[in-house]
């Protein structure tokens, strides 16, 4: 079998697996967010500059942006705009989650070009990488929401194994200290750290984070 055919077949297999795990990560987040009540929206989150309202608005906007990217419309920055939550933020989030899953389900090739202006204004990314970017975001944000609500969070082992190398591939450095950075600088994990802890610390999350008793609502970015 020619190498290029073998490589293409492997890429399709990888994309099918990643798409399945991506759907699991997004649906796990939906399960958590369906537990959110109006009184929870002012709670602080592990994303220090966001209350739960701000985090939920960001997560909803990212679903819209990545859905647009999968449909060939990601270059439109309006698709990525974070908007204030409406009267039913849980329904908004659920609809956006279903939208991004449907959009990636329609992608036919793992090398399909996706415009991700929040990552680069001058280049596109293959769908295989784009769905990986979105997957790691929702594994971590799922943990953010769970910690905020004091709920258990236990993604499946296969999902975590797929997410770990993606988390480790995210560039690290002082630039993560910028106000608009999605992640904080990486933290040490410890030799005996489990897979979820390794993912969280690679992206600057402390697995020991606990919700403080008081907070000042702030919908800014962490």
Image (spheres, rainbow, N blue to C red):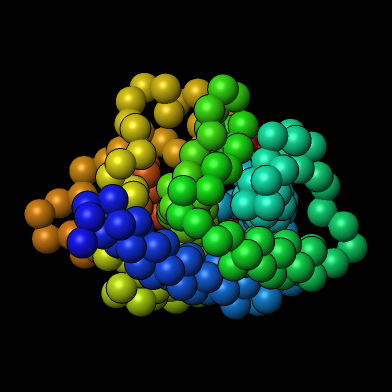
Q: Is residue 139 left or right of residue 159?
A: right
> Is residue 195 visible in the rendered structure shown here?
yes
**Farthest residue in the right direction?**
87
Q: Is residue 37 left or right of residue 137?
A: right
> Is residue 212 visible in the rendered structure shown here?
no
Viewer-nearest residue: 99 or 137: 99
| Screen quadrant of the C terminus | top right
The residue located at (26%, 59%) in the rendering is: 6
Viewer-nearest residue: 135 or 124: 124
The residue located at (59%, 37%) in the rendering is: 116
Residue 141: give x, y in percent of width and height.
Answer: 51, 56
Residue 150: give x, y in percent of width and height.
Answer: 51, 70
Using the image, determine if residue 179 lies above or below residue 201.
Answer: above
Using the image, determine if residue 88 lies above or below residue 59.
Answer: below
**Farthest residue in the front direction?**
1
| Screen quadrant of the N terminus | bottom left
The residue located at (12%, 60%) in the rendering is: 192
Q: Is residue 209 left or right of residue 218?
A: left
Q: How many labels does the image show?
A: 0
Residue 113: give x, y in percent of width and height.
Answer: 55, 42
Q: In this view, does 69 lie to the left or right of 113?
A: right
Residue 119: give x, y in percent of width and height.
Answer: 53, 32
Rendered image quadrant of residue 33: bottom right
**Farthest residue in the left direction?**
191
Viewer-nearest residue: 64 or 46: 64
The residue located at (22%, 55%) in the rendering is: 2
């Amino acid at each position: 079998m020619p190498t290029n055919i073998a490589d293409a077949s492997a890429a399709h297999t990888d994309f099918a697996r990643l798409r399945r795990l991506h759907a699991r990560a997004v649906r796990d987040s939906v399960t958590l967010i369906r537990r959110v009540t109006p009184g929870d929206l002012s709670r602080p989150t592990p994303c220090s500059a966001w209350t739960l309202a701000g985090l939920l608005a960001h997560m909803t906007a990212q679903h819209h942006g990545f859905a647009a990217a999968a449909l060939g419309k990601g270059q439109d920055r309006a698709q990525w705009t974070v908007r204030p939550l409406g009267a039913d933020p849980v329904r908004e989030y659920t609809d956006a989650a279903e939208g991004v899953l449907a959009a990636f389900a329609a992608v036919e090739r793992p090398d399909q070009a996706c415009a991700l202006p929040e990552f680069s204004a001058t280049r596109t990314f293959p769908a295989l990488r784009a769905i990986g970017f979105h997957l790691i975001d929702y594994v971590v944000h799922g943990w953010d929401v769970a910690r905020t609500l004091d709920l258990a969070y236990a993604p499946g082992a296969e999902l975590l194994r797929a997410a770990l190398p993606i988390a480790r591939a995210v560039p690290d450095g002082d630039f993560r200290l910028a106000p608009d950075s999605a992640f904080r600088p990486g933290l040490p994990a410890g030799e005996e750290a489990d897979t979820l802890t390794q993912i969280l610390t690679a992206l600057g999350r402390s697995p020991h984070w606990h919700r403080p008793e008081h907070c000042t609502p702030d919908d800014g970015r962490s």
